[in-house]
Amino acid sequence: MNAVIKPAPAAAIAPCFPALPIGGLAGTSFRHEHLAAILAEGAQRGFFEVHAENYMGAGGPPHRALEAIRRDHPLSLHGVCMSIGGERPLDQAHLMRFKHLVERYEPALVSEHLAWSTHENTYFNDLLPLPYTAATLARVCDHIDEVQEAIDRPILLENPSTYVAFRESTMSETDFIRAIVRRTGCGLLLDINNVFVSATNHGFSAREYLADFPLSHVGEIHLAGHAEQADDEGTPLLIDSHDGPVADAVWKLYEIVIGQCGPVPTLVEWDSNIPDWPVLKAEAAAAQAILDRCHAILEDRHAAA
Amino acid sequence: MQPHERKPSYAAAFAAPLVDPELETPAIVAGPSGKGAVKRYNVYRNNVTVSLIDALAAVYPAVQRITGRDFFRAMARFHIRATPPTSPLLFEYGRDFPAFIEGYEHAQAMPWLADTARLERAWLDAYHAEDAAPLSAETLAAVAPERLVDLVFIAHPATRIVRAPFSVVTIFAANRSGEEVGRIDASSPEDALITRPDLDVVVRHLPTGGAAFLLNLMTGQSLGEAAASALEASPAFDIVANIAGLIEAGAFAAITFGDA
């Protein structure tokens, strides 16, 4: 006899989450240390974004926390480690884990990075840059196709912040990104802090970059803080550190972008030196105020038309 | 095979110096207008090393508390260079760290440090383990007495055992609490049972003979077999108390009966 006697599996039935709209909303990174404060406030206007890899364990408190958050809020699932810009084929086990998370939590937004983090058998835990050439473009597009096929929906691809350029690059970043959108049908996650950081580091104009960016494909915006160092010549080198408030210059660019794109869902990222919940919430509220103002202007225009 | 596969590898050239400080800045990268990129590239080196040290510190907070921050970070840096992660799941990283600590020359004065690390690694594995309802005392009580010897226990997915010739449970508990740690006598052997019946990971000190008994049960021995070997090892071994303790800890998920 081999009958297994055990209690009924209460957790076996996956919870079904409501389809909550994310349009026009500001959100924040979700941090476990904020869980109690967030739940104490009950359902709020806004969304939460999580790094997919933090929820790739089998069970335990991370999933319980994310379920609690997801019940009342739209979710953005942000992949950090797919290595879409890498030279090697995508890690199939990782892709399957990502797919399961998309199925389980039914996020309103799904995004990944134009970067790589794994080569051969080593995972570097950083978003590393790639040259912009016809060859890398083809491979990045193959990888995005593969992800989108696996999860059966388009992703948003995030523009990188970089500290170096590749001598072999033959295309500008905006041309590269525009070609990716055209070939794969993916959307874009525009990280305005990344634009500001890269513009400073490479000596180009952030406004010109944004003017050249395919804004009509932007489905989400990221805002974050950065730190300042210096390069070999002593000129400022900005570090995409996500460890403080959004800089004034980035807020300014954000208002310009929102004026052109309309109220695109906007995330305030804060990944280290994480403040208490009210501080992070206030940063998101500042973004929400800009989104709401834009929304009101659009309403007025509609009314006048 | 894709036609665009065989270009010179930017990733190989960029990756190698990331965790090898002896190597120079890759020649394929530059600053604006062909400017040098030593400090610029070092941002990536720093991101990789610091974030991986932070990842180890997140897995092994008690080890860091014992050694102090500077000692820990120096030791972790050596480990990262020798054994960088192979998985993008950082909560899986550092499985080889306890063995590294055991061989680390500057940690030889702390022979219990590696076992403390093993216990922390088991704690995190239990934290992320699959959810399951633990076996209840009532389910066990409903088994007819004559069938008890054939009973086979199925371990809860979170259950782990760490056996140590040092006071590893005491050291772990003291250094994972927020409180001040006094002097600890590290010399008495302690076996740890790690469980997570619901949300909280619990670390317990197993009684003498308890670890061998539970290990036998976890490998599929029947209660009769496991009890016999436990009693053989120590006639004073208390089967009933041990089973009760394991049930209370949530060490099992289910029971079944062998092929008998």
Image (cartoon, helix red, strand yellow):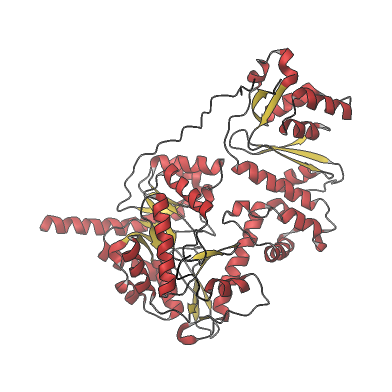
Q: Can you see residue A41?
A: yes
Q: On the picture, is A123 further left or further right than B193?
A: left
- The answer to which quarter of the image holds residue B242 is top right
B136 lies above or below A165? above
Q: Which residue lies furthest to the left in this view?
A: A305
Q: On the picture, is A148 further left or further right than B200?
A: left
Q: Give how far across and how far down residue A253 sits, in percent.
A: 34, 69
Q: Which of B183 and A138 is in front in this view?
A: A138
Which residue is pictured at 79% across the width and 31% down the height?
B213
Count of numbered tags = 0
Q: Give how far across and how far down residue B162 sits, in percent.
A: 75, 42
Q: Give how far across and how far down residue A49 sits, in percent.
A: 43, 52
- The answer to which quarter of the image holds residue A198 is bottom left
Q: On the picture, is A73 further left or further right than B216?
A: left
A282 lies above or below B13? above
A28 lies above or below A257? above
Q: Nearer the viewer, residue A193 or B35?
A: B35
Q: Give how far across and how far down residue B39 sits, in percent.
A: 57, 79
Q: Can you see residue A42?
A: no
Q: Nearer the viewer, residue A116 or A274?
A: A116
Q: In which quarter of the image is the C terminus of chain B?
A: top right
Q: Nearer the viewer, residue A203 or A160?
A: A160
- The answer to which quarter of the image holds residue B132 is top right
A82 lies above or below A227? above
